[in-house]
Image: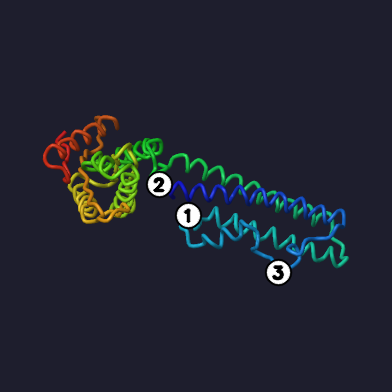
């Protein structure tokens, strides 16, 4: 989930909540005062014309929306609109609508409101843990995930490896091509890293041009295989920075295993020393910690 997309989602949810509240007030005002309903409350063809429905339709293929909590919210939204339309039609036709039906409709509207606020809060918390440039999780989220994976490794006896990656000669990219080019390189590197690790690995923006990769269930041999794949994938691409010629980018990697004998800070320090060794011995290579 990129930070821009998370921001769009939060805006969409906030808009949906505000529109929902305004629509609710207008609906009950029309029902109680007899001032007449808006055509959108009466016609089937008007369904899906509010901005939240349009946003859902436009982003229907997004993996972010393909989850139970969001599906449930969309269903609540549709059900509330459908119920409101059916009741409005009956009222317009002069049919009696009982107080219990209005109360049930009010409960339905409230359920959508509460669910939307809950989801908005959850996505807001998630967005605060994203790096704004790359869309990767930042160091705040990283610490929690690393602790979880280390505990799982200690409990199961399965290995876990932590690696640091640093883009080679990154300062020269900023100096020669500008910071916008540097930002594009960081974004492309984050994309390559994420696409070439295993599905259950974790990639984080560690800071500057450094990334941290957590490799659960990977000993140093397996970690070396994954990191070599990532290294090669990055070295094989060219990054379009808006100039006549794209540029090539490489990265150096250092890896170290988690251990019951040392804490996470020490493991990261060992990976950092291995990374330094990779830099010293030629760059664009993977170095495994010797302990």
Q: CA distance from mark 3 to mark 2?
A: 39 Å
Q: Is residue 210 above or below residue 81?
A: above
- Give the percent coordinates (x, y) of residue 153: 30, 40
Q: Which mark is residue 135?
A: 2
Question: As drawn, which residue projects farthest toward the left?
Answer: 281
Q: Is residue 114 visible?
A: yes
Q: CA distance from mark 1 to mark 3?
A: 28 Å
The residue that mark 1 highlights is: 64
Which of 281/204 is in front?
281
Label 2 – label 1 distance at C-alpha: 13 Å
Foreground of the two, 104 or 134: 134
Label 2 sits on a secondary structure element that is: loop
Q: Which mark is residue 44?
A: 3
Res 31 quadrant in image: bottom right
SS label for mark 1 = helix
Q: Please report contact status of discs 2 and 1: CB closer than 8 Å, yes or no.
A: no
Direction from residue 167 to residue 207 in the image, left or right: right
Q: Is residue 49 left or right of residue 28?
A: left
| Circle 1 crowding by C-alpha within 10 Å: few under 14, some 14–19, many from 20 | few
| Residue 245 image point, x, y percent | 25, 55
Q: Quadrant of residue 252?
A: top left
Q: Secondary structure at mark 3?
A: helix
Give the answer, above or below, for where 74 lies relative to 178: below
């Amino acid at each position: 989930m990129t930070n821009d997309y998370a921001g769009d989602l939060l805006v969409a949810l906030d808009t949906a909540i505000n529109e929902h509240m305004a629509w609710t007030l207008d609906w009950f005002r029309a029902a109680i005062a007899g001032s007449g309903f808006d055509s959108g409350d009466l016609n089937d063809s008007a369904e899906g014309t509010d901005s939240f429905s349009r946003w859902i339709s436009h982003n229907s293929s997004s993996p972010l929306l393909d989850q139970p909590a969001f599906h449930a919210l969309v269903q609540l939204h549709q059900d509330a609109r459908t119920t409101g339309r059916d009741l409005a039609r009956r009222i317009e036709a002069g049919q009696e609508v009982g107080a219990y039906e209005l109360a049930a409709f009010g409960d339905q509207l409230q359920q959508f409101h509460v669910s939307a606020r809950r989801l908005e809060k959850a996505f807001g918390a998630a967005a605060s843990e994203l790096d704004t440039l790359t869309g990767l999780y930042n160091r705040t989220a990283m610490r929690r995930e690393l602790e979880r994976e280390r505990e799982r490794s200690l409990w199961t006896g399965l290995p876990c490896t932590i690696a640091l990656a640093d883009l080679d000669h990154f300062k020269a990219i900023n100096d020669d091509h500008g910071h916008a080019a540097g930002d594009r390189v960081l974004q492309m590197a984050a994309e390559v890293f994420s696409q070439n690790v295993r599905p259950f690995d974790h990639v984080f923006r560690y800071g500057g041009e450094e990334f941290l990769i957590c490799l659960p269930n990977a000993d140093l041999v397996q970690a070396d295989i994954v990191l070599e794949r990532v290294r090669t994938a990055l070295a094989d691409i060219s990054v379009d920075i808006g100039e006549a010629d794209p540029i090539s980018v490489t990265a150096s990697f250092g890896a170290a295993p988690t251990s019951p004998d040392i804490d996470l800070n020490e493991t990261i320090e060992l990976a950092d020393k291995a990374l330094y060794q990779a830099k010293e011995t030629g760059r664009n290579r993977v170095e495994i910690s010797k302990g």
